[in-house]
Image (cartoon, rainbow, N blue to C red):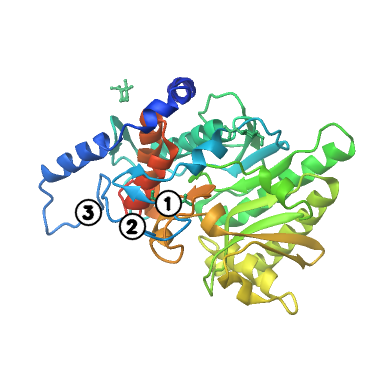
Amino acid sequence: MLLGKRICVGWNRLLLLLPVVILIPHFLSVKELHQQMDSQDIPKEKPKKPDHLIQGPAAGEGLPNRLQCQGTRALNRTQILRFRNNSLPTDHVALVTVFTTYNSTPGSRPNEMVTVGNMSYNKVERSMAILNVFLNFVQVTMPDSHVIILTDPAFNLPLHRDTITIQPIQGEYSRDKLMLQRIRSYIMFLQTRLEKLKQKQEQVTHFIFTDSDIAVIGDLGKIFSDYPNFDLALTFRNNKDQPLNSGFIAVRGTTDGIQRGVAFLQEVLAVYSSKFMRASRMLGDQLALAWVVKSKPNFNIKRFSRGEAFQDMIGGASVLFLPCSLYNWTPPEGAGQFHGMSLDVKVVHFKGSRKRLMLEAWNFLSSSSNLPDMLCLILRSGRTKYDF
Ligand SMILES: *[C@@H]1O[C@H](CO)[C@@H](O)[C@H](O)[C@H]1NC(C)=O
Ligand SMILES: *[C@@H]1O[C@H](CO)[C@@H](O)[C@H](O)[C@H]1NC(C)=O
Ligand SMILES: *[C@@H]1O[C@H](CO)[C@@H](O)[C@H](O)[C@H]1NC(C)=O
């Protein structure tokens, strides 16, 4: 959208002023939020999810290699240098997300308006705002990459931006089937690419399939060169029942990589359809992913508790397992199992009721152009569930 674009242009210009900007603390807007909070009388008998950010302590305080914050001012600056360095050529990478909107979900009123900053959003507008902020983050942190949005052909996505491709894919996009359809859409998308690749109509592009409620804050393309031998990458955490999150799946864009990636996803789809259909609404894909991985003979499940990347052959595919603490960091787990935020974090995932924080974080970044400070804002505000 025009607004988003203007913000980005201004932001790039601000980068040049960065050494000066860094010195100025940026907690003004948060202070304002606190003042707003104080002046509101929230009736006690009706507990509502907060409509403004609630700041708590920054997890990971005193731990080495964890972001240290003073208010929303970051004391570590390592990230910004890496993040700004465009001098190293990266492989061709595209982020791919499945997107559609729903007018109503059980327990929510579609016309209820929610306000972030000076904007108000109804239910559908909220989904669109999340998608736009996702695109904004990619545009400023991986400016050379492309975003592909897979969507229901019946859905007319009201989005007007360059550097994105909207690709309709036939399927069943009802709320209940979306997670199932998402894997199908990934497979169909990859099969189409494979045909084009074989006919040499396309150059090699690596794909990273993600949820759209994430903020990309580091160069994800590097995984394809840092780990040159994997076909497919997944993110894991130390969680017995759901060690794998489906919100981040990378596929190497070579013929072999795509073929093996497709075969792996087809296996996941088959397991999903046969074993986890009762969970189809929410978690079926993650349960199926874990089932496929764990059913490999001699798979050492203990590696999920160590937090270091590792590789293993699953079926015919070489699968790279990346720690969620870097590639799929979520605010509530940052306070718990991740013990704060690594200085090298690359993806923040605003699951569930943290979507307000995603928009607030983007607003903060576009006014301060200070990425580490924004991470402090996220770290301190992520324990609360919000209304957005
Ligand atoms: C991060 O900042 C804190 C506070 O200034 C400092 O003690 C720590 O060494 C820094 N960490 C790294 C890895 O630079
Ligand atoms: C960017 O990377 C190049 C090559 O590694 C290095 O020489 C340069 O100092 C880096 N620049 C910044 C700002 O980090
Ligand atoms: C909303 O706020 C932004 C940033 O403060 C400002 O640039 C914009 O003009 C405002 N929009 C409206 C409609 O007030």
Residue shown at 80% from the left, 38% from the top: 204
Q: Which percent across, then down, holds residue 117?
A: 29, 33
Q: Which residue is mark 2?
A: 383
Residue type pointed to by label 2: Arg
Q: Earlier in the sequence, mark 3 or mark 2?
A: 3
Q: Which percent across, then down, holds residue 163?
A: 61, 27
Q: Which residue is mark 1?
A: 67
Residue type pointed to by label 1: Leu
Q: Which residue is mark 3?
A: 48
Cβ(mark 1) to ligand 1 < 8 Å? Answer: yes
Foreground tag (1 vs 3)? 1
Q: Nearer the viewer, residue 169 or 326?
A: 326
In the displayed orientation, state which residue is furthest to the bottom.
Answer: 298
Rendering quarter of residue 30? top left
Q: Nearer the viewer, residue 111 or 218?
A: 218
Residue shown at 24% from the left, 34% from the top: 28
Relative vertical location of residue 201 with respect to residue 107 in this rendering, above or below? above
Distance from the alpha carbon under mark 3 to that under mark 2: 15 Å
